[in-house]
Image (cartoon, rainbow, N blue to C red):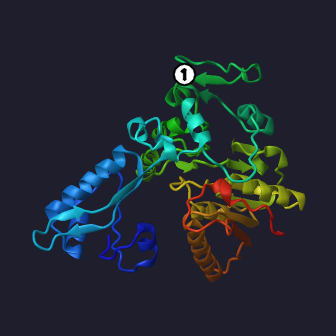
Amino acid sequence: MSHSGVSGIEELVSDDLNVLKVPLNYEEGVTEEMITILSERLVLDRKQLTAMLRGLFISYKESDATLIEINPLIRESDYGRLICVSSKIFIDDATSKRQSQIFSLHDKSQKMAVELEADKHGLLYIQLEGNIGCLATSNALATITYGTQLIGGVSPSIHSSCPHPNPSLSDLPVFPTLRTAISSFPSKPHATAVLVPAPHAASAILEAIEADIPLIVSVAEHVLLHDMFRVQAALRSQSASRLVGPNCPGIIAPPAKCRIGIMPHLQYRAVCAGILSKSGTLSYEAEGATTKIRLGQSLCIGVGGDMLPGTSLSEGLEALLRDEATKGIVLWGEIGGEAEKEAAGFLKEWDREALGKGGKRKPVVGMITGRTAPKERVMGHTSAGEWNLPSL
């Protein structure tokens, strides 16, 4: 909140040093401490401010909003009443099914013809920039062929355990729930891959967290923002599980022949380069380049480009810095957020401490794409492509 007024809150937050920023915990909601800070600093009536903020937060959660803005908010000089002169709300497009009543208010005259056609078939049209290619494969079969030890799968569509319906995977049992699967084996699995559509991804991730699975990889894109708020709260409440993703290709460790995700495994070679990336496609470019010049890979981590990743670039960087098999690191960034700046700050501090203890620095090469992206326009990570990989 701020005493200043501009046409866009995003401009205000980035440029005005007088903005009062108060963190909001998604699970706790609007707390008395928050209200005290805002009412005292902005000299606003506590009762009115409480009703307004709590009402806004309820609307924010119930509507799957990504932003609710009141600008300007006026306080009457005579009576002290707070008046909302103008406001706007942004709704997550991926919630069109869950928020059908809100989306029914959409002005269809503002939609493109292809969006209207998608609506007729109950689909969500997402415009992508650049050339996009798709390849459908049996992911489990590819993972086993690579050498990864799979012990089973989970599908809530079945009522009891049974062999996998694919003849090539008939040795793998399929279970109705993760808990049933875990109880069927003598020891808990080391990792699980969540390969379900975005609307169901959060439930699958939460089930894995409750089961204390050490590593959880989710590849789904467009997981609902408010679903990820709940996942983040669950992650912070424990220390047994780590999530990689969503919206990522996963993890692959060529020396161990371990692939958890959807990476094109045939181009990987077990040597010494660690690859860390927000973009899946750009990480494949780096992996192909390091294989071509015989550096190969030790460990490759795709953290994903979502707003609320389970593992940040800094956390992924720390994992590679601690990995003895990794002798050098390639870091791919992209437009959106400040994860790259935070990773650079983390690396600087890590190197300072390492050199202070008589250690050595690991070479790190980084690239951030999206220089030609237009200003003041929200763009998906697919638009951030930069196809000229620097010499490594």
Residue 122 visible in the current orientation: no
Total numbered labels: 1
Q: Where's residue 7, x and y in %?
A: 40, 69
Q: Residue at x 67, y 21 (%)?
A: 164
Residue 16, located in which quarter of the rendered image?
Answer: bottom left
Residue under pointer 1: 157
Left or right of 202 in this view: 353: right
Position above or below: 348 against 374: below
Q: Residue at x 57, y 18 (%)?
A: 161
For the C terminus, give its image quadrant.
Answer: bottom right
Q: Amino acid at mark 1?
A: Ser
Q: Dot 1, how many residues are within 10 Å of its Cα: few (below 14), some (14-19), or many (20+)?
A: few
Q: Residue furthest front?
A: 109
Q: Residue at x 54, y 21 (%)?
A: 157
For the N terminus, give its image quadrant.
Answer: bottom left
Element on which disc 1 rests: loop
Q: Residue at x 75, y 31 (%)?
A: 141
Q: In front: 38, or 93?
A: 93
Q: Where's residue 4, x and y in %?
A: 33, 76
Q: In front: 387, or 155?
A: 387
Position above or below: 229 against 205: below
Q: Residue furthest left?
A: 79
